[in-house]
Image (cartoon, helix red, strand yellow):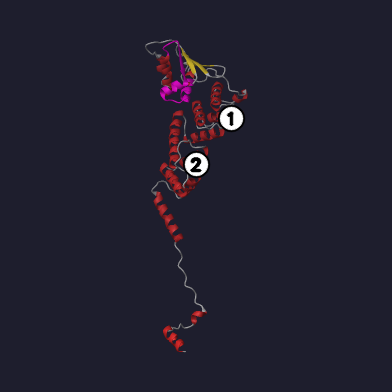
Amino acid sequence: MTHFQLHGPAKSGHTLVPDQFLDEYMPAANGEYVKVYLYLLRCLKSDVQDLSITLIADKFDHTEGDVRRALKYWEKMHLLKLEYDDSKTLTGICLTEEPVPEKSPKSFSQGPKLPEPSLSPDAFSEIPPLSQEEARQLLFICEQYLGKTLSSTEVSRILYFHDTLGFCPDLIEYLVEYCVSKGHKSLRYIESVALGWHKSGYTSVAQAKQQTSAYNKAYFSILKAFGIFGRNPVEGEIAYMNKWMKEWSFSQELIAEACGRTMTAIHQPSFEYADKILSRWKAEHVTRLSDLDALDQQHQTAKSKAETPAPKKAAPSSRFHNYRERSYNFQELEKQLINH
């Protein structure tokens, strides 16, 4: 856990919050960002105090990414300055004496300069709605999450999220953070998630968090129906589950039923087998559990007809059956043989 130093005007016994912050900055800010800023003010009980991203995240039950986004936001607002060493590690946060009066809380174009990502100047030649400094900051953060230098193709993909999909920088940061936290650093995978979010109409980090949390619960519910515990779903399994929930719009009850029937049929979890079941249900327009009653009855009737043996045909008569059958008294015949 890396610590940094918090320093600024020393206060004691009480926490002073500037009126300008309350009047101009707080109304436009995310509530979680406000908490982080007020906590930093509260921590200024001495000239210098050791803190860390982890400690602040634990204080509010946030992720470390949430805290970083809050700090970046207030840096854009010029209410604090983030300090880095040569290895790009956060070493300090300096709170300003007073908010800068001439800056609007919604102005992001004059943010402090961060260490630049390893990109050619041509990468920023066409970024109409996003300033070059914002783009540099966004791409630098993405490089930190992905742990590598971005290629020109990868830069284009990330800027595509902003220019074409209309994602704000905070949402792009959360997108990358979310995918990396799930073990996926491929830009192709990140782009597929971004397209899904765009299709679902996500425009803010709050919306994405709410929906991804709901889908995470759904994923683990499906794994549980298969008897799978103690691990995260892998990419192929997620693709199946997204198809069932998002494309085919099946309820959790129907998906769990398909998983249960899979286990009954082959006695082991199989997304492929469950997919065949759900594909058949989709073709039969099944939308709720009660629809399965009639479908199961039809299937059982068809199965019974297939298993019913055909009636045996009478054996054809032969020429040997044309003789008149005779009856013999075997006792009388025996006497005749003895007398003879």
Question: Would you place residue 255 above or below residue 138 in this image?
Answer: below
Residue at 55%, 29% in the rendered image: 158
To which quarter of the image does residue 127 belong? top right
* Residue 139 rendering spot, x and y as whole percentages: 55, 25
The answer for how far apart the CA atoms under marks 2 and 1 are is: 26 Å
269 vs 124, left or right, is left
| Mark 2 crowdedness (10 Å alpha carbons): few <14, some 14-19, many ≥20 | some
Q: Are marks 2 and 1 in contact (CB under 8 Å)?
A: no
Outermost bottom residue: 340
Q: Position of residue 4 (x, y in %)?
A: 49, 16
Camera-nearest residue between 297 and 326:
326
- The label shown at residue 154 is 1
Residue displayed at 45% across by 45% down: 259
Q: Which mark is residue 240?
A: 2
Determine the residue located farthest toward the left in the rendered image. 13
Query: Residue 63: within the magenta?
Result: yes
Q: Residue 224 versus residue 328: which sits nearer the camera?
A: 328
Residue 111 visible at all: no
Q: Left or right: 158 with respect to 254?
A: right
Rendered residue at 48%/18% (across/down): 3
Which range is magenta?
A: 44-72
Q: Nearer the viewer, residue 266 or 111?
A: 266
Q: Amino acid at mark 1?
A: Glu
Q: Amino acid at mark 2?
A: Tyr
Q: Position of residue 161 (x, y in %)?
A: 53, 30
Q: Is residue 300 above or below residue 9?
A: below
Name the quadrant containing residue 115: top right
- Which element type, helix, strand or loop, lies under badge 1? helix
